[in-house]
Amino acid sequence: MVEKKDVVSKYGLPEKVVYCTKCVVSNQRPRITFDEHGVCNACRFAHKKQHLIDWSDRERQLQALLDRHRSKDGSYDVVVPGSGGKDSATVAHRLKQQYNMHPLTVTWAPHIYTEVGWRNFQNFIHSGFDNILATPNGRVHRTLTRLSFELLGDPFQPFIYGQYVLPFRIAVNYKIPLVFYGENGEVEYGGSSKNEDKPGQPIEDFSRFYFSGLLVDEFVKYGISERDLQPYRMPTYEELKAAGIEMHWFSYYHKWVPQENYYYAAEHCGFQANPDGRSEGTYSKYASLDDRIDGFHYYLSFIKFGIGRATSDAAHEIREGHITREEGVKLVRRYDGEFPNKHFKEFLDYTELTEKQFWEIADSFRSPHLWEKVNGEWRLKCQVS
């Protein structure tokens, strides 16, 4: 086993930190790639969205797909996962109102609802949608959250399991073969380009891209029973194939612009932005508002990869032309890595950790190629400029 003092970088990250010349993301984002001009693949895809994709042809493809699945008897014909946030609300509303589909929306409950998150969820349902809200066993979910924090440096992992598993379980159980997600995050925000030109993602890629390589089975060794892990398990390939399940991204068919989704959801589904004016760790006010654990997911990303919430927000807003790179750099330098104090006590209570234990665990995920201590405080060795 390699001694910790000999480790130069963790998680297989490049030892030399390089920032995209177009946006503010670095090569420390998992699976991201850079070309010979120092441009990340998310920026290259943004250019492709603006200039190279024939969106009228994509619209025809969408119409043909939905014509094939649209119910004739009023039954549900598409599963739309989501929280009632701006993106899922936009997808569900457009499928129903613009394309005359009959969606069944499904929601995997947050760890701890925020007030605005619950309000947006209720506003979404009352704007005209049937919904199944799945709330997992609280004791098990708390345990999985703490384990995920300790093992992965990401307390959000149990939510990610449920968010991706639940729609497929509902699709199989209700015999609804079409599942529509919002965006292909890998190509929109920087990651694998494997499925860039595909309308959906093969099931086998979910574990690789979204489950952080930690399969549900591995929690058994920590005393979680097979029965308690069932809600977190994807249906088998055989079940999905027998049910004829197709998974598609709305972003493949329509140009994906989160800011426009915010305006659309606010107008049609009663979506409300963060009443605090902005979310901790960033300058934006309309993304990831549902869960009091959200801020720790982003903060741990900052610790592990040097990429916080403001970097993610600024990067895609630069690609969409909403801000310049210079403005993005200033926003990142001002807000990235801001600690989510507002819900810290609730996080500690939820995971049954002391503040000392929290920092011992969190700091253990700092990679020595990214971080150094200066006057007793952690500082990134290389920052965007």
Image (cartoon, helix red, strand yellow):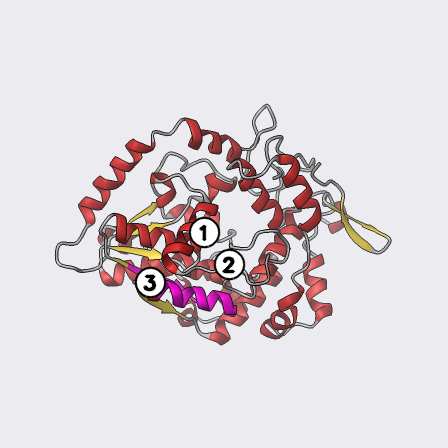
In the displayed structure, 333 sits above or below 270; it is above
**Residue 376's mark?**
none
Residue that carries the numbered disc 1 in the rendered image = 262
Decide which of tag 2 and tag 1 comes sooner along the chain: 1
x, y (%) of residue 238? 27, 53
Pointer 3 local density, CA inside 10 Å: few below 14, some 14–19, many at least 20 = some
User: Answer yes or no: do the residues labelled 3 and 2 have beta carbons within 8 Å?
Assistant: no
| Distance CA(mark 2)–CA(mark 1) | 8 Å
Q: Amino acid at mark 1?
A: Tyr
Residue that carries the numbered disc 3 in the rendered image = 127
Residue at the far top in the pictured view:
36
Residue that carries the numbered disc 2 in the rendered image = 273
Quarter of the C terminus within the rendering: top right
Pointer 2 local density, CA inside 10 Å: few below 14, some 14–19, many at least 20 = many
Closer-to-camera residue (25/350):
25
Element type at marker 1? helix
Q: Amino acid at mark 2?
A: Ala
Residue visible at 71% across and 63% down in the picture: 359
x, y (%) of residue 83? 42, 61
| Magenta stretch bounds | 104-125
In the displayed structure, 354 sits above or below 280; it is below
Q: Amino acid at mark 3?
A: Ser
Q: Quadrant of residue 300?
A: bottom right
Assess whether residue 117 is covered by the magenta stretch. yes
